[in-house]
Image (tube, rainbow, N blue to C red):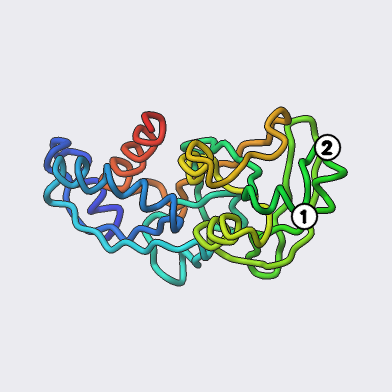
Amino acid sequence: MRQIESATEVVRPKHQASGHLRVGLPGDLGIQILKPVFTEFMSEHPAISFEISTTDRHVDILREKFDVVFRVGEVQQNALISRTIAHLDMALVASPIFVAQWGLVEDVRRLQKLPFARYTMAGRHYPIRFVNGTEIVPEGRVDLDSASAIREAVISGVGAGHLVRRLVQEDIDQGRIIELLPSMKLQTVPLQAIHVSGNMPPHRLTLLVNFVAGAMRRA
């Protein structure tokens, strides 16, 4: 039935794409993505409706019946198709109070001794990777499963943080937090659009993925 529906959509003009999409977005980054979806995409495609979940939890796309999930990081589920639509710059950050207490960080060895507000999912602590190949798993004072919680912990001085740059750039610009080791380039992290494998994804899904990819390039 989905293939029949998809074939029908393909022969329609672009502006007549229709149907329903169940979409998963990463929490804080998802809020940034939603703004152009609400103001542009939904206006251009009034016959497409949505059910949208915003969470950093790695949802089960098959079991929870998502049409597409946008996820930061690598995909580890079978029977899925993924497309990298952006490479996200990362930043190491800490509050001025934290830096005053722990001192300036001059190298990775010093970085390893700092307490971090770590991003943790399903018991896994995500590593910090540098372009030169250096990789560390930070020591943790508090483990969290969302970027907003890590940002709050960083601003409060609880620990250093490793976050998507676009989520904390305003904080850096306004002096609420300080960038650590700015001369050492961090590896980017992929933003991927993931959906169940199949011969022909619905046209409305392809339109949405292409739109989000373009919006991320413009941001």
Q: Quick one: label 1 or label 2, which is nearer the N terminus?
A: 2
- In what quadrant of the picture does the N terminus appear? bottom left
Residue 126: image location, x then y, percent:
69, 55
38 vs 151, left or right, is: left
Tell me the element at label 1: loop
**Which is more toward the observer, 76 or 115?**
115
Q: Mark 1 packing: few (<14 Cα in 10 Å), some, or many (20+)?
A: many
**Which is more toward the observer, 74 or 171?**
171
Q: Residue at x 79, y 54 (%)?
A: 114
The residue under label 1 is 138
Amino acid type indicated by mark 1: Pro
**Which is more toward the observer, 138 or 43?**
138
Q: Residue at x 80, y 46 (%)?
A: 111
Q: Residue at x 23, y 53 (%)?
A: 5
102 vs 43, left or right, is: right
Q: Mark 2 packing: few (<14 Cα in 10 Å), some, or many (20+)?
A: few
| Number of marks | 2
The residue under label 2 is 107
Amino acid type indicated by mark 2: Asp
**Which is more toward the observer, 199 or 77?**
77
Residue 200: image location, x then y, percent:
36, 46
Residue 115: image location, x then y, percent:
76, 59
